[in-house]
Image (tube, helix red, strand yellow):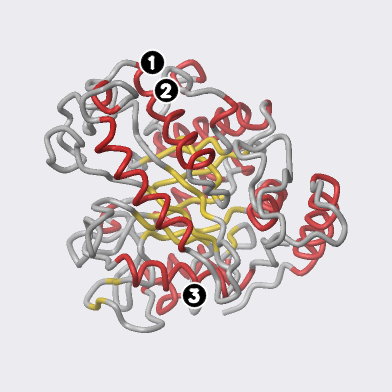
Amino acid sequence: MYKRKNRLFIVLISCSIFILNACSTSEKGITETEKPFEKTNDFLVDHYATNETLALYNNLKIVTQNAVLFGHQDDTAYGVGWNTVLGRSDVKEVCGDYPAVYGWDLGDIGNKSNLDGVNFENMKRWIREAYSRGGINTISMHLDNPVTGNNAWDNSPAVAAILPGGSHHNNYISTLKNVADFMKDIKTSNGENIPILFRPYHEHNQTWSWWGKSACTSDEYNQLWQMTVEYLRDTMDVHNLLYIISPQDLSDQFDYFERYPGDDYVDIFGLDYYQLTNPASITKLGKSLDIIASLAESRGKISALTEVGNEKLTIDNWYTDYLLKALMYNENSKKTAWCLAWRNSNSSHYFVPYPGEKSVMNFVQFYNDPFTIFENDLPDMYK
């Protein structure tokens, strides 16, 4: 089930090459291996981002003007009724194509598997496979409470204790080192670092997490974000990340910046949204996407719908008549770079249809819409 958008791809590829050449300051004849930390840009959080990471950002920025990439959490790791089967994907089995964006999570990093039972070594392999097909990977981080040791949903205060000088700072740095080691180990067989859309400390305007608004002050949250970026980028030399901030729901532009570490620490403006369940919510989400797209564009950044979904797809036409309508609400909302549906754990907790599920045909219609991009539609996003 191919969709053909060749003209879009040609424009995207041409513009990508032009922007990459214009922004890169690489010296002719010097390879990345010989000089791996040469400055490549002056506008990303990481001025030493790899060329592939810079290209991904520039290409995403162009895609925002034309279409939206579709993503799915843990897509090739498991689905409804299966787990860790080579090549399987509920999305692919329904529409014949993989998603353009793959979501992963580093909760329980340092252990063999993450909080959802995904083996970390397998995760690296699936990330490499997605990249080899031209796909894009994004990683979130449901880390355990670093003071109590309980899961991420333990909203006992912890941030003050892990900032520099805090009682648990050194222990938390050990956790961040595990994160850095994971990111640096995501390489191709040629040793090329695979770019990652990194989304730490998400939904920070909610109260469920230890980094949320009931557990730390705005200043503490911002310090945590800045400390994390500086440790990964400056101390550990991780240069394959684009940094995404993603509150959940949105009232207005002032609400978006209530907890915000600053333009120098954020590449992409994200939004998580799970209230798309009635006609009024279509307009509400559309307006929210309009706001963050405007805010992002005014700062030279990108916007994305970083999590979205309707659990168990209780609305049969949800993908076309709710999600797609919200994304296409107006010219600004159409600039949303990607939308990522949450995971398919089992028949009681899923967010994309699986073979035999009642909304399969609606999802195929969503897939076939010219506005949506899946993996087969992607040009080379890394050049």
* Amino acid, disc 3: Glu
Q: How many marks?
A: 3
> How many residues crowd around disc 3 within 10 Å: few (fewer than 14), some, or many (20 or more)?
some
Residue 89 vs 272, above or below: the answer is: below
User: Callout 2: helix, strand or loop?
Assistant: helix
The CA span between labels 3 and 2 is: 34 Å
Quarter of the image where the C terminus is located: bottom right
Residue 49 vs 133, above or below: the answer is: above
Q: Which mark is residue 287?
A: none
x, y percentage for residue 81? 22, 77
> How many residues crowd around disc 2 within 10 Å: few (fewer than 14), some, or many (20 or more)?
some
Mark 3 lies on residue: 129
* Amino acid, disc 2: Asn
x, y percentage for residue 218? 37, 17
At x 54%, y 61%, the residue is 136
Q: In the rendered structure, which disc, 3 or 2, sits on the residue that comes first in sequence? A: 3
Tell whether label 2 touches label 1 (CB within 8 Å): yes
Mark 2 lies on residue: 222
Tell whether label 2 touches label 3 (CB within 8 Å): no
The CA span between labels 1 and 3 is: 39 Å
Mark 1 lies on residue: 219
- Which one is in front, 274 or 54? 54
At x 43%, y 43%, the residue is 199
Kindly indicate the quadrant of the structure image that contains residue 35: bottom right
x, y percentage for residue 373? 59, 62
- Which one is in front, 165 or 320? 165
- Which one is in front, 320 or 84? 84
Q: In the rendered structure, which disc, 1 or 3, sits on the residue that comes first in sequence? A: 3
- Which one is in front, 213 or 147? 147
The CA span between labels 1 and 2 is: 5 Å
Q: Which residue appears farthest toward the front when viewing the image?
A: 34
Kindly indicate the quadrant of the structure image that contains residue 266: top right
